[in-house]
Image (cartoon, helix red, strand yellow):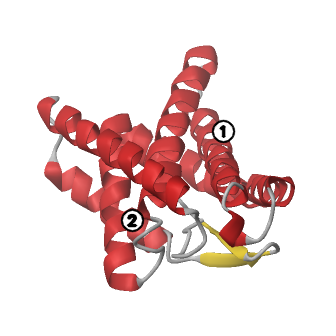
Amino acid sequence: MHIPDGFLSPLVALSLYVVSLTVVAYSGRRYFREGGDVHYLSVMAAGIFAAQMLNWPIPGGTSAHLVGGALAGILLGPFGGCLAMFMSLLVQCVLMGDGGITALGANAFNMAIVDVFAGYAIYRGVMRLTGRRFLAGFLAGWLAVAVAAVTCGVELGLSPQFGYPLGITVPVMGAWHLALGLVEGLATGLIVDHVRWAG
C-alpha cells in the first residue's frame, strides 16, 4: 500500500501532507499527555516495520502487505497507534525507500490515520456489541485495512500521473485488500486475544 514518488498529483500529495502532519502532531501530544509509554511505542513501531516487509504483488500495478494499523490502535489507543505507524513509515521511507518522500503524507494518511482510527472504532464497536476480543480484533484488522486500501485507491485514481481512473483503482485496491485482509484480521484477532489472556 506504500505509494512511491510520482504516482500522486502535487495537489493530492500536498493536501495529504498537511492533513497527516497535523493529525500526527496532535496524536503525539495526546498520547504523551495521557501518560503514553515511549517503550511500548517503540516496540509497536518496530513490530509494524517488520510486519510490513512482507509484500505480495497484486494486479493493477501495486502490492499488498500486512499493515498493523488496527492492531497498533487497539493496543496503544488511536493516538499512540497513529504515532507508532508514522514512525515506522518515516523510517521505511527515508532509509528503505519503501514509499516515496513526496507520497509520505498520503501513506501516513492511509496507514497511520485511516487504518488506525477505523480499526480502533470497529474494535470498540464490536466489543460493545459482543464482548468477544478475537472477533473484534479480527473484524477491526480486516475491515480497517480494506477501508485504508480504498482510500489509497481514491488518491491514485484522482492523480492523472498514475494512469488508471477511479473505476479501476478503487475496485482493485478494495477487492484485493478485502481478500488479503483476512490474513491481517486473523493476525490482529489472535494477537489481541493473546495479549488479553497473557495480561
Residue 31, numbered label: none
Q: Residues within 10 Å of mark 1 (few under 14, many from 20)?
A: many
Q: Which residue is mark 2?
A: 89
Residue 139, numbered label: 1
Q: Residue at 61%, 49% (x, y): give it.
A: 148
Q: Is residue 64 left or right of residue 48?
A: right
> In the rendered image, is residue 198 in sight?
no
Q: Is 86 drawn above or below residue 160 in the view shown?
A: above
Q: Of callouts 2 and 1, which one flags the residue occurring earlier in the amino acid sequence?
A: 2
Q: Toward the viewer: 191 or 69? A: 69
Q: Nearer the viewer, mark 2 or mark 1?
A: 2
Counting labels gives 2
**Quadrant that contains the C terminus:** top left
Q: Is 7 drawn above or below residue 130 in the view shown?
A: below
- x and y percentages locating residue 181 in the rendered image: 69, 55
Q: Residue at 37%, 47% (x, y): give it.
A: 18
Q: Is residue 166 left or right of residue 128?
A: right
Q: Residue furthest bottom?
A: 96
Q: Are marks 2 and 1 in contact (CB under 8 Å)?
A: no
Q: Is 120 drawn above or below residue 126 in the view shown?
A: below
Q: Is residue 128 left or right of residue 29?
A: right
Give the amino acid at mark 2. Answer: Leu
Question: Which quadrant of the view contains residue 93?
Answer: bottom left
